[in-house]
């Protein structure tokens, strides 16, 4: 019997391949009952009362605790902080994301990774009303023949936003980020380069990260 906790098997393999020696990445289907996986501290920190939102948050934290265990940390509560980002144990950086079907998580040791962000989006075109807001003229030219790659740029910018907000507390606008999918990087308006990894399947998953040695580089 197929594991009910698995995402689409091909997507799960692709997401796992985003992992490296310094970042662990995984995905999990969001299932009925996942809301009960929230620990007391987590439940108090998540104000959403909508069942779907709490269920997705529970699924993400199941993943987070599994990845922490793989890093050698004792699984623990991962509450939501005042900024909305998860609060990880000392020495850990990480990020969550979810859509209606799956949760994704990325976790690493702070000594190796200064910041990480992850996003998941449906593998479908970016809505027309978001194109001019999200995608720069240069980016539009690079994805002109592939509408779904507009959504991939959107996912990349969401992941970069999370990584930079966690690292610097800076809240970026979409136009502050220029994504180069071919080079697997994003360049911020101030010149900082954020590295990207991504996979395309039934969903689009993008990982953005800043290696530890690059924490204070421009």
Image (cartoon, helix red, strand yellow):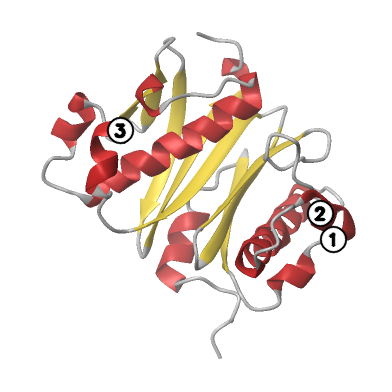
Give yes or no for contact between labels 1 and 2 (Cβ–Cβ under 8 Å).
yes
Which SS class for mark 2?
Answer: helix
Q: Quadrant of residue 98?
A: bottom right
Q: Quadrant of residue 38?
A: bottom right
Is 164 placed left or right of 155 in the picture?
right
Number of the front mark, 1 or 3: 3
Which SS class for mark 1?
Answer: loop
Mark 1 packing: few (<14 Cα in 10 Å), some, or many (20+)? some
* Residue lying at 43% horizontally and 64% vertically, measured from the top left: 11
Res 39 label: 1
Is residue 142 depicted above or below 193 in this figure? Answer: below
Mark 3 packing: few (<14 Cα in 10 Å), some, or many (20+)? few
Number of the front mark, 2 or 3: 3
Residue 147, given in percent of the width and then of the height, sits at 19, 49
Is 212 placed left or right of 144 in the picture?
right
Q: Residue furthest left?
A: 145
Of labels 1 and 3, earlier in sequence is: 1
Residue 115, given in percent of the width and then of the height, sits at 62, 29
Residue 23, given in percent of the width and then of the height, sits at 61, 41
Instruction: Give the residue pinned by disc 3.
Output: 133
Q: Residue furthest bottom?
A: 1
The one nearer the camera, 96 or 71, is: 96
Instruction: Give the residue pinned by disc 2.
Output: 42
Res 91 label: none
Residue 58, given in percent of the width and then of the height, sits at 71, 63
* Residue lying at 49% horizontally and 59% vertically, measured from the top left: 99
Instruction: Measure how far apart labels 1 and 2 are at the Cα level.
Output: 5 Å
């Amino acid at each position: 019997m197929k594991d009910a906790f698995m995402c689409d098997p091909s997507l799960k393999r692709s997401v796992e391949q985003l992992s490296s020696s310094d970042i662990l990445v995984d995905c999990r289907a969001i299932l009925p009952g996942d809301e009960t996986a929230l620990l007391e501290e987590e439940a108090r920190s998540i104000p959403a009362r909508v069942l779907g939102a709490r269920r997705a948050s529970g699924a993400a934290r199941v993943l987070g605790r599994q990845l922490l265990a793989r890093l050698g940390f004792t699984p623990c509560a991962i509450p939501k902080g005042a900024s909305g980002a998860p609060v990880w144990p000392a020495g850990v950086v990480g990020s969550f994301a979810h859509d209606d079907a799956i949760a994704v998580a990325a976790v690493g040791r702070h000594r190796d990774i200064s910041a990480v962000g992850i996003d998941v989006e449906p593998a479908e075109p970016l809505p027309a009303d978001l194109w001019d807001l999200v995608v720069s003229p240069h980016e539009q030219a690079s994805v002109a023949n592939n509408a779904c790659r507009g959504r991939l740029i959107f996912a990349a910018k969401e992941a970069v936003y999370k990584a930079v907000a966690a690292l610097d507390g800076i809240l970026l606008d979409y136009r502050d980020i220029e994504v180069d999918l071919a080079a697997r990087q994003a360049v911020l308006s101030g010149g900082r380069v954020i590295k990207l990894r991504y996979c395309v399947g039934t969903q689009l998953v993008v990982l953005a990260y800043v290696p530890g040695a690059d924490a204070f580089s421009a």
